[in-house]
Amino acid sequence: MRTLAVGIDLGGTSIKGALVDKEDGIVEEHSLPTEAEQGPEHVLDRIATVVKKLWPEDGAVHGIGIGSPGGVSWDRTTVVRSPNFPDWGTVNVRDGIARRLGFDGPIVVGNDANVAGLGSAYYGAGRPHDHFIMVTLGTGVGGAIIYQNRIFRGSTGAAAEIGHMTIDYEGPLARSGVAGAIEGYLGNQFLSRHAFLRLLNEDSLVHDLVPEGNLKNVTPKILSRAAEKGDASARRIWEWAGHKLGCVLGSAINLLDIRTVIVGGGTSGAGDLLLSPARDTVRRFVTPALQENIVILRETLGNEVGILGAARLAFQYLDADDPPSRSK
């Protein structure tokens, strides 16, 4: 008998979901716009709609896993102060979805970067590795620590906020307010702004690729296209970004003694344009005793890794490998 769960990747723009087979991965997918501006109750309605669309006719779903940006309570029920949903405050996602679906099986919520790490561990680039650091590069910069194929959550569930690790105590402020945090360099809006300022007075193919010829519309994807076409200015920006990534990864490796890093998220689509300079840089910031066997890989599953990881939360609950609550 197949073991099935629904995995949900809750994003600021869209809600992506899939029916997932524990062994074989994604069976069917569906997505809807999030419409986050209409408030948490509306977003919970949207999540429930995606789940219903994926529900098999025989009803044989064993659990639901949800990956969400923001802090998640230790019991994996509640999202707290999600940066993508500024009006949410504290929302018990588990109870809201259970009520809408009339489902009494496990509904498990996790931070989206942690969930992506779990998806990589079981279905993606992380499969050959029992432990690794996951970095997700997109609107923000997220992180996960996978140790013995489980998420390391810290004391309250908020471990691995790599995006808010600083590489320059006098650097630019990230959305968290931390000066010099890596998100303040590599989060999409920050990287795009850096590219805009760098390219204003440079002859670059990017000027021809941006919508309406307006350099303010530059995105990491456009930078990648220009660099792949040989544009020297775009390549230098990726070298700059890779250097920053290598700096923060050096600190993470020093702290954790975990030497495999997997980089996912939309910005990781730049591939070796970003990762090669990160590989060149990282050893300069790692103590000599830890410099051997450092590996930086790209996660190639894209958005699927978050959906698969969300489903894996439910599977782990069912297996009692990673119980979602503890006695206080």
Image (tube, helix red, strand yellow):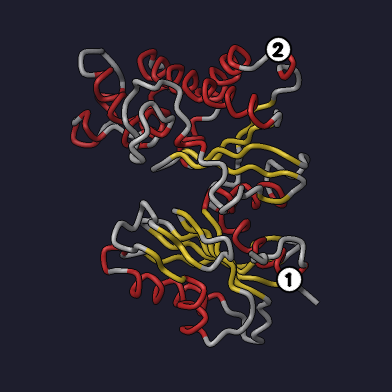
Please report the residue visible at 71 percent of the width from the left and 29 percent of the height from the top: 257
| Quarter of the rendering containing residue 179 | top left
Q: Label 2: state its secondary structure.
A: helix
Q: Is residue 216 left or right of residue 322?
A: left
Question: Residue 47, relative to residue 230: is it above or below?
Answer: below
Work out which quarter of the rendered image holds the N terminus and state it: bottom right
Q: Is residue 283 left or right of residue 93?
A: right
The residue that disc 2 covers is 288
- Mark nearer the N terminus (1 vs 2): 2
Work out which quarter of the rendered image holds the C terminus and state it: bottom right
Location of residue 111 in the rendering, given as x and y in whole percent from the top left corner: 52, 54
Could you tell me the amino acid type at mark 1? Leu
Let me know if residue 225 appears in the view.
no
Could you tell me the amino acid type at mark 2? Pro
For disc 1, the neighbor class at 10 Å (few under 14, some 14 to 19, many from 20) is some
The residue that disc 1 covers is 318
Q: Nearer the viewer, residue 26 or 109?
A: 109
Residue 139's label in the rendered image is none
Observer-side mark, 1 or 2, equals: 2
Location of residue 159 in the rendering, given as x and y in whole percent from the top left corner: 57, 45
Please report the residue visible at 60 percent of the width from the left and 50 percent of the height from the top: 155
Let me know if residue 144 appears in the view.
yes
Q: Nearer the viewer, residue 286 or 18?
A: 286
Q: Is residue 81 left or right of residue 149?
A: left
| Quarter of the rendering containing residue 185 | top left
